[in-house]
Amino acid sequence: MSVLKGFKQKEQRYIINTYNRNPEKTLLLVEGEGAVVRDEEGREYLDFLGGLAVTALGHCHPRVTAAIREQAGKLVHTSNLYYTLPQTELAELLVENSCGDKVFFANSGAEVNEAAIKLARKYAQTVLGEKRYEIITAYRSFHGRTLATLTATGQEKFRRGFDPLPEGFVYATFNDLDSFAAAVTEKTCAIMVEVVQAEGGVYVAEQEFLRGLRRLCDEQGLLLIFDEVQCGMGRTGRLWAYEHYGVEPDIFTVAKALANGLPIGAMVAKNKAAEGFGPGDHASTFGGNPVASAAAVATLQTIFEDNLLAHVQERGQQILQGYERLRQSFPGLIKEYRGRGLIIGLEFTKEIAPQVQQGLVEEGFLVN
Ligand code: PLP
């Protein structure tokens, strides 16, 4: 029996089937370097998937790997009852390079969105002294898989079968300010949107929409939360996608590419909103773990020092030009391409995305 066949049998025997991996077609990846990953037979793939928006600097970036090695040899974990150097350094970098004032660390996108939801409710109840708890999110959004974040997610398919879901989420239409304004009630405490809807199909927020949401929140005393879990960390060509708009959120969340592959998430809040939480209100055993934080510090420093934001803009333009050539070469096949920087989606006129994806794997390219 080949190594791979034995491995696939074990995988099917021991792992719960939540990822719909086709045993005949999925790959066993064993190493990566830069934009390339290799399977167990040494076959190389150019990785446009980036671990689902995670390995922004490429695989095993030497500076990140060195930071992980160094920190792992010093201190892997303490607890959030004590200070650690990497966590504080990371908080400083996030605050000094964003509109936020304070950070809460967790381990994933869902967890930091959960933290943002809790903070918005607590802020309304403790700071404003009002029993407001409802959060308006967008149809087609994706905010995570915990019970609260999947309820925040404006796509019914993710919620099916998990009743009863937590109360307090309503949905409005992305890029439609009137739809959001109409959803505000005396129970609303916040509006939460992705600046670029990623999982929902790559839809970029319009300037007037985000500006309008800011105005609406200011008029109604609501918090504005941006989920930058997928579109943050330079993916759009600015460190935070909201920077393209001249609009600042009260809270934003980041995860995925933050540590270029180690699990970490951060909720960044302005002082006003951060006041909603006090000691004991929220916690995470591993949140802001020293090794993950050291990797995140190295990731951010690399983005700044290697001038990667300009690089993202250039490569993004190159891909868009390529898509335009494709559209012209295959008339009637490509409906639209959308995106900003390196978060780009291609929509076909027919249901052929799975075949295209599989064809690309066979040619040595990984895409989502
Ligand atoms: N928010 C957005 C915008 C996402 O794209 C995702 C994941 O795809 C999440 C939240 C959830 O992140 P995680 O899988 O790290 O919990």
Image (cartoon, rainbow, N blue to C red):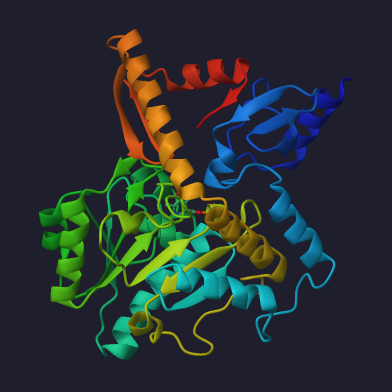
Where 260 sits versus 324, above or below?
below
Where 8 sits versus 53, above or below?
above
* Residue 252 pos. (x, y %): 39, 66
* Residue 60 pos. (x, y %): 71, 45
Which of the 4 image quarters holds residue 169?
Answer: bottom left
> Residue at (89%, 20%) from the top-left corner?
1
Q: From this viewpoint, is residue 112 visible?
A: yes
* Residue 92 pos. (x, y %): 53, 75
| Image position of 338 (left or right of 353) | left
Q: Number of marks in the image?
A: 0
| Image position of 108 (left or right of 64) | left
Where 163 sits versus 94, above or below?
above
Which of the 4 image quarters holds residue 39?
Answer: top right
> In front: 154, or 337?
337
> Residue at (21%, 48%) from the top-left corner?
206
* Residue 12 pos. (x, y %): 73, 34
> Residue at (31%, 89%) from the top-left corner?
127
| Image position of 303 (left or right of 253) | right
> Residue at (42%, 78%) from the top-left corner?
101
Where 279 sits versus 31, above or below?
below
Which of the 4 image quarters holds residue 84?
Answer: bottom right
Q: From this viewpoint, is residue 330 visible?
A: no
| Image position of 61 (left or right of 308) | right
